[in-house]
Image (cartoon, grey):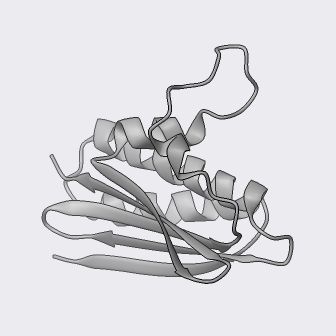
Amino acid sequence: MRLTASLPLPRQPSSVTRARQVLDTLLSLTEASDDYRAALNLMITEACTNAVLHSQPDSTLTVTITIDAARCTIVVGNRGDNVDRGKLTADPPDPLAQSGRGLPLIAALADSATFATTQPGHVLLSITKALP
């Protein structure tokens, strides 16, 4: 079975919830465990929140979710240029810091997480996690 959803979403906080709801609905059609679903929900929440916070003001988010027999892939895209690819491999910030945990958390939970610039001014974060 292969499930795919592609969503263009406005750059607003409610889009984070919408993306998470679509992911959860797709995962409900699989035999994914609660722990696996929780990890993916956390990763999509962090990725979409970063896109909302750091993309250009008039930007639209694109979220594509693909689930097949082997893995789940989440791709979050937005207009923006200032991507710090090093944050995917960075240590978590100081425990008292108010931000900076999202990308290291995604990197720790995902099997792979990479940034790509597909066209000038457009950034994609691709997250992959194998099905257990």
In the rendered view, would you say 83 is above or below 100?
A: below
Q: How many marks?
A: 0
Q: Is residue 38 visible?
A: no
| Apparent side of residue 49 relative to residue 44 in the rendered image (left or right) | right
| Viewer-proximal residue among 44 and 32 | 44
Q: Position of residue 85 (x, y in %)?
A: 53, 52
Give the residue furthest to the right. Answer: 57
| Apparent side of residue 43 relative to residue 48 in the rendered image (left or right) | left
| Viewer-proximal residue among 91 and 48 | 91
In the rendered view, would you say 93 is above or below 63?
A: above
Residue ID at (58%, 71%): 123
Q: Position of residue 92 (x, y in %)?
A: 54, 25
**Residue 101 in which image quadrant:** top right
Q: Is residue 88 visible?
A: yes
Residue ID at (15%, 76%): 1
Q: Position of residue 68 (x, y in %)?
A: 20, 70
Q: Position of residue 71 (x, y in %)?
A: 21, 60
| Viewer-proximal residue among 77 and 9 | 77
| Apparent side of residue 29 relative to residue 75 in the rendered image (left or right) | left
Give the residue furthest to the bottom. Answer: 119
Residue ID at (24%, 42%): 33
Residue ID at (30%, 42%): 36
